[in-house]
Image: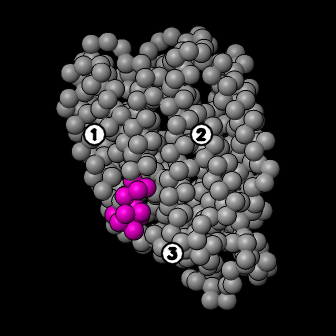
Amino acid sequence: MLDASAVRPPSSVSPANAPPSRGALLAVIVAALGYFVDLFDIVLFSILRIPSLQSLGVTDPAALKSLGKHLLDLQLIGMLCGGLAFGILGDKFGRLKVLFGSILVYSIANLLNAFITEVWHYEVLRFVAGFGLAGELGAGVTLVSELMPTARRGLATTLVAAVGLCGAVAAGIAAQFFSWNHCYLIGGILGLVLLVLRVGVVESGLFHLARAKSHVARGNPFQLLWPPRRLARFACVVLGGLPIWFVGGVMFIFAPEIGVALGCSSAISPAKVIMFAYSGVVVGDILCGLLSQYLRSRRYAILAFQLLLAASIVCFIVSASESDTRFYWLMAGVGAATGFWAVIITAAGEQFGTNLRATAATSAPNFIRATAVPVTWVWMWLTPSLGTVAATMWLGLACCAIGICAVFCLQETFDRDLDYLEH
């Protein structure tokens, strides 16, 4: 429900086509670099799963797979908890505090991860790192969306995602030159260095306006559950992103196992998979953002890429085994088709009023990421009966179908004025 009495303060959002302010541009830079470090750290475990666990004494292939799944689940559950916590804090105390607090938490966790000697150390730090990693993207996208002119915010959030996703590519490259513990060390140091850039970034004017209304509840997560139409809105955002984290939770992480099932002639390198896949994701995010601007629609751009993703999964399954090179390039194509991530997170923030926006935009991507937990369990449950290849294809297509149905139910928010409250 729109708050008819809301009046935009001079420091909030510029007119639709006005040039962005210096503060808005600086917010874009900091959010983009923050997401760069965020993605660098998120994908490190996907790349370093096998060598790091082997160094801790885990050598059995089945144990490497099951324990890797367990650690991934802990990281994703940490993200889910952190998404809720940082989202609430973002609406109560400001987007900037969450942005920098989350960077500090995951940077320290990754620094400590470089010195682990026991599996339980890994378990604790993957949860803590996930908790910290949860806050950066949502807070950054919320801040940028509220500071940028209406017609330009999609381009700004696309830039944030494109720069950020390069962090995953950088992680893939770093893993080929440095040991697993040095990679974690690099990620932690990058995060701490990034905190220096916080000087000069301004808080959202829309947040200040909402905070000035003492009678308005801010950051109440129960508002996402009631009324039912608001809950349905949030659920559709989460389910709309489900196919992305089928790919991220199954195809990217378990690419070596999928490669064996497909009959690839040599072992698939996790670092190369991440490097190729996220190079594709960067290209896809830019193209999806531009398509959204061209169509002046979030929904149609997302739907187009969801259909492309379904086709790319089938193409990968059918022909990835022809050569190792084809495997990596087709994985890049699958990654490119998941490029609607930035657009759907932007839409998540646009779906909700200022007093609930950070809660929704910060928790939504982490609920989406957390869908990888049940999805990977279903994949592992299906694998013995269907086989790895068939389970991957049919589960992937099912996730795409669910995502398409969910996005059809979302409201179009491309040119929505964000100066409104939820009651």
Return the residue at label 3. 416
Q: Position of residue 73 (x, y in %)?
A: 54, 37
Q: Quadrant of the C terminus?
A: bottom right
- On the question of residue 24 being in view, the answer is yes
- Determine the residue positioned at 42% across, 72% down: 411
Q: Could you classify mark 3 by the number of other residues whose Cα lies within 10 Å: few (under 14), some (14-19), or many (20 or more)?
A: few
Nearer to me, 331 or 20: 20
* Earlier residue among tags 2 and 3: 2
According to the image, what is the colour scheme of the structure? one colour
- Label 1 Cα neighbours within 10 Å, binned few <14 / some 14-19 / many ≥20: many
Q: Mark 2 sits on what residue?
A: 36
For the residue marked with disc 1, what is the amino acid? Ile
Q: Where in the figure is residue 292, as x and y percent of width and height?
A: 40, 61
Report the amino acid beneath label 3.
Arg
Q: Earlier in the sequence, mark 2 or mark 1?
A: 2
SS under mark 2 = helix
Measured Cα–Cα span from mark 1 to mark 3: 33 Å
Residue bounds of the magenta highlight: 288-300
Q: Secondary structure at mark 1?
A: helix
Q: How far across and down, in percent of the image, does residue 220 sit? A: 68, 68
Q: To which quarter of the image does residue 4 belong?
A: bottom right
Q: CA distance from mark 2 to mark 3?
A: 28 Å
User: Is 166 placed left or right of 380 in the picture?
Assistant: right
Q: Is residue 90 visible?
A: no
* Distance Cα–Cα, label 2 vs label 1: 26 Å
Element class at badge 3 = loop
